Image: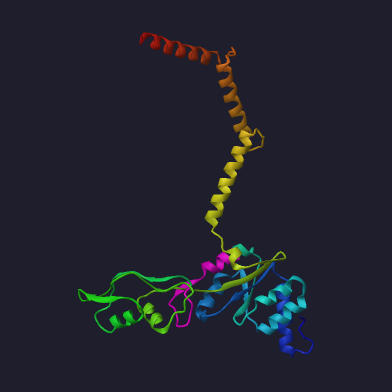
Amino acid sequence: MALYTHHLPDWKRNEVEKIKEITGGFTLVGLVDMYGIPASQLQQIRRNLRGIAVIRMARNTLMHHSFDELGGEFEQVRKYINGNSALIYSNENPFRLFKLLEQNKTRMVAKAGQAAPEDIIVPKGPTSFKPGPIVGELQQAGIPAAIEGGKVRIKETKTVVKKGGIINAKQADVLAKLGVKPMDVGLALQVAFYQGAAFEPEVLNIDEQAILNQLGLAAAQAFNLSVNAAIPTAETIGAILTKAEREARSLGVEAPVYVKEIVGAIIGKAYRETAAVQTAVGEY
């Protein structure tokens, strides 16, 4: 649905035009989730991405106006905009940008009400705490603890919060005291539009080493197929000729075909067979 933009105040109209101008200057436009990022960390991320990506914060309504006016493929951006969205621009490909944003995330303590990004596990073993109220706090958070040798010890490895579970206040407090930092904090790429296609995080989050291993296996299988099927390519012609020569020599020796290149091998085969017969006869 088109938005009415004709009667925007001047400052809003200027912001819409600026967003449109910047969008036209990059090959990639995307949205990032800014939720929970401290100002100091955001400044550091901006410094780390200097020359690679530009982050621009704007009101959601103005982003909607901008992409509505741009039209075409940019209208798709609007459905990804939420309360914590900011714009990100780059000339990198989306896979490279996603990786850079992930590398700029830092681990932080959890806050009450946050969802666990993974199973939060506290291992058994000694702690640095002296006997005191911490024992009861641990137990209230579901972590079995006791006093041993003048120190608080966690009696068994415990999954405090399952992946996707909401962290309560007691759990957040205890995890912070234990130095457990389960939260990845940084810019989370929501979507990247690049060369007419939308790339979501699920597509961009790839295991590069696994992909390289698959490519290596595919290359090896293609090489073997080319050699065994005698389909010559620049990469396999040498192996094909070597294989053909080896098979021709074997055939010539078995036939036998008396040519100077293999006559020595034929004679050697004959000697070996004669010796085998003499050995067999000698056994009787």
Give the x, y percent position of residue 153: 27, 73
Is 276 in front, or is 80?
276
Is 232 in front, or is 8?
232
Residue 20 falls left or right of residue 258? right
Report the number of numbered marks: 0
Q: Residue at x 65, y 32 (%)?
A: 230
Q: Quadrant of the rendered structure where residue 222 is? A: top right
Give the x, y percent position of residue 145: 28, 76
Report the quarter where the C terminus lies: top left
Give the x, y percent position of residue 174: 36, 80
Q: Residue at x 66, y 37 (%)?
A: 234
Report the quarter where the N terminus lies: bottom right
Residue 222 falls left or right of residue 195? left
Q: Residue at x 73, y 77 (%)?
A: 67
Residue 135 falls left or right of residue 206? left
Q: Quadrant of the rendered structure where residue 245 is? A: top right
Residue 232, compared with residue 267, is above or below; it is: below
Colouring:
rainbow
Residue 280, compared with residue 235, is above or below; it is: above
Q: Quadrant of the rendered structure where residue 173 is? A: bottom left
Confirm whether the magenta stretch covers residue 234.
no
Residue span colored magenta: 96-116
Extreme left residue here?
Answer: 149
Residue 224, compared with residue 217, is above or below; it is: above
Confirm whether the magenta stretch covers residue 102.
yes
Give the x, y percent position of residue 217: 56, 46
